[in-house]
Amino acid sequence: MLFERLLVHDDRGAADAALNMAIDEALLEQVTIPTMRFYGWRRPSLSFGYFGKFADLAAEREDRDLVRRWTGGGSVLHGEDLTYSLVTPASESAAALGPTTIYAALHGAIRDALRRVGEEAELAAAAAPKVSDACFANPVRDDVMLLGRKVAGAAQRRTRGGFLHQGSIQVPGLNESFRERFAAALAPTVQRAEIPLSVLKRATELAAEKYRTEEWLNRW
C-alpha cells in the first residue's frame, strides 16, 4: 500500500469548475497527511492541462465551464465522471516515488476496485499513438481500460510541499462501495472527514484570484 493512513473527503456539494481546482490546490498547500477528495461538478465542465492552448478549446465555452488545471495532461469532460484528487505531503515516503510509479499504483487500485464491483478492467501495457489533445482519446501505459476503452486518466503537479494528483474515472454509476474500495486499496487506515474551513477559505481566494481569471484561462 502507498500509505499507512489516508484521509478522505467525500465532497458531495458539487462546486463550479474554478472552485474545484482551487480546493485541490488549497488542500496541497495545507496537507499534513495523505488526503483524497472525491467530487462532482455544478455544471458540465471541461478542464485542460496547465500547458494546454485555450484557443483550441474556446468554442467549448458556449456549452460548458472551462478551467485550466494546475496539473498537466489533456482535456477532460466532467459531469458524468467520478473525479478525485490526492494530495500528499513531502514528508511521506510515497512523495519520494517517481510520477510513473504513483500513477501505476493509483491506477492499479482503481482497476482492482472496478473488478470488485463487477467491471473487467485492465491496465494499458503501452501507450497508444496520440490522436488528439483529449485525455481519454490517448491511452498511456498504466491507464485503466475497460472493453478496449480508456476509462481513467490523471495528471500530477509536484511542489516542495508535496504532490497533487488529479484523476477522472469515466465509468457511469460508480457508488460509495467503489469509493470505499479504492481508498482501502491505498491505506490500511482510512478516515473520513469534512474539508477544513481553512481550506475552503483559501480555495475561495484562489478561485477568485487565479482560476476564474481570464489571465489564467488564457495563459498559453
Image: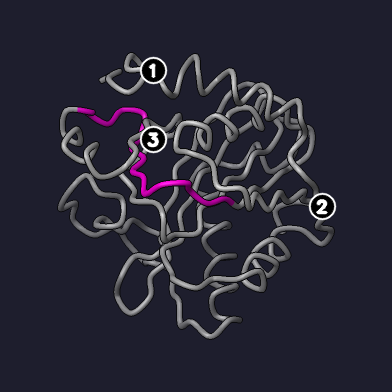
For image coordinates 73% across by 51% down, the residue present is: 8
Q: Secondary structure at mark 3?
A: loop
- Asked if the residues shown at circle 2 and circle 3 are in contact, with their CB atoms under 8 angstroms apart, the answer is no
- The label shown at residue 72 is 3
Calculate the distance from the C-alpha at mark 3 to the C-alpha at mark 1: 19 Å
For image coordinates 30% across by 43% down, the residue present is: 64
Q: Position of residue 170 (x, y in %)?
A: 41, 63
Q: Position of residue 88 (x, y in %)?
A: 68, 38
Q: Which residue is mark 2?
A: 4
Magenta highlight range: 39-54
Q: Nearer the viewer, mark 2 or mark 3?
A: 3
Q: Secondary structure at mark 1?
A: loop
Query: Nearer the N terminus, badge 2 or badge 3?
Result: 2
Which three-letter amino acid code belongs to the residue tagged 3? Gly
Which three-letter amino acid code belongs to the residue tagged 1? Thr
Calculate the distance from the C-alpha at mark 2 to the C-alpha at mark 3: 28 Å
Res. 69 image quadrant: top left
Q: Position of residue 49 (x, y in %)?
A: 35, 35
- The label shown at residue 213 is 1
Residue 200 higher or lower than 106, as above or below: above
Q: Nearer the viewer, residue 57 or 13?
A: 13
